[in-house]
């Protein structure tokens, strides 16, 4: 009888090991797949500023198609296989040229070889006025052409020719965007990908992070039996919205 008991205990331990091994392997495979998807196909980003309003708002979380412009080295972001070139109007995420630790998001306006000039807020490409339907101007003041390199180039800029394998990018919130007018062009090697959908969106008090804002909403529920929408609310109308 003792031998049977030992055998049953061993079988139980074997089944237990098999169970944990099976789920451990599944978890490992899932982790590898997630890393591959993030490195080569889709990556999530959040919007921390209002430079792309009204297209993208602070508190929007979006997905970026990393495959749009090519297959890249996941460590250096250099293109291995080119798939397509950025097109005018694309909303792109890229490595900020002045600080590679940061990612920016803007809209492509100027393409390689094009002559671009901004006159009194209006964008001209190869001498032709180009209007972006999503662009907004919140400041009626027009800053005159700069008289020195230290003066602002927000409303009057250029003319410049966009270099090869580069793009000129601008924010949709034209008067409140720090973009190519101030720091130059975006190399194709710096592109992360093209934004295509908002998968989550929330709103809270200006300057308040996600978790403090969520805590404020919960506080209203606990103490006043009513969620505080001024502290935290979901923007249901933006979830699932395509980025154009």
Image (cartoon, helix red, strand yellow):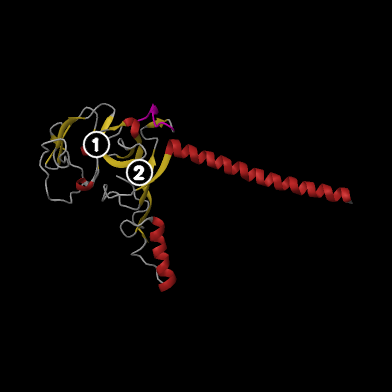
Among all residues in the image, which is located at the extreme bottom? 224
Vertical order, 29 against 234 (above or below): above
Name the magenta segment's main secondary structure: loop
Q: Is any part of residue 125 visible from this angle?
A: no
Residue range highlighted in magenta: 75-84
Q: Secondary structure at mark 1?
A: helix
Along the line of sight, the residue nearer the viewer: 10 or 65 = 10
Name the quadrant containing residue 183: top left
Q: Secondary structure at mark 2?
A: strand
Q: Which residue is mark 2?
A: 196
Name the residue rendered at 42%, 62% in the picture.
215
Report x, y in % for residue 27.
Answer: 58, 44
Vertical order, 16 against 193 (above or below): below
Query: In this image, 198 relative to 164: left or right?
Result: right
Judged by depth in the image, the label closer to the viewer, 2 or 1, is: 1
Q: Which residue is mark 1?
A: 183
Numbered badge on residue 58: none
């Amino acid at each position: 009888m003792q031998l049977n008991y030992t055998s049953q205990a061993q079988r139980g331990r074997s089944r237990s090991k098999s169970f944990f091994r099976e789920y451990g392997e599944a978890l490992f495979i899932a982790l590898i797949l997630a890393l591959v998807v993030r490195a080569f196909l889709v990556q999530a980003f959040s919007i921390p500023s209002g430079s792309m309003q009204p297209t993208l708002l602070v508190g929007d979380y979006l997905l970026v198609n990393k495959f749009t412009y090519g297959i890249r080295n996941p460590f250096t972001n250099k293109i291995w296989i080119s798939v397509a070139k950025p097109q005018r109007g694309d909303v792109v995420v890229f490595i900020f040229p002045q600080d590679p630790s940061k990612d920016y998001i803007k809209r492509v306006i100027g393409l390689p070889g094009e002559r671009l000039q901004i006159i009194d807020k209006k964008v001209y490409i190869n001498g032709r006025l180009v209007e972006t339907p999503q662009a907004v101007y919140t400041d009626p003041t027009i800053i005159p052409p700069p008289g020195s390199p230290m003066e602002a180039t927000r409303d009057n800029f250029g003319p410049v020719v966009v270099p090869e394998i580069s793009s000129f990018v601008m924010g949709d919130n034209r008067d409140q965007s720090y973009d190519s007018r101030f720091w130059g062009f975006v190399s194709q090697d710096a592109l992360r990908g093209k934004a295509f959908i908002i998968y989550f969106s929330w709103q809270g008090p200006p300057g308040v992070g996600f978790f403090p804002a969520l805590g404020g909403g919960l506080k209203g529920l606990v103490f006043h039996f009513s969620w505080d929408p001024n502290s935290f609310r979901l923007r249901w109308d933006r979830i699932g919205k395509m980025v154009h």
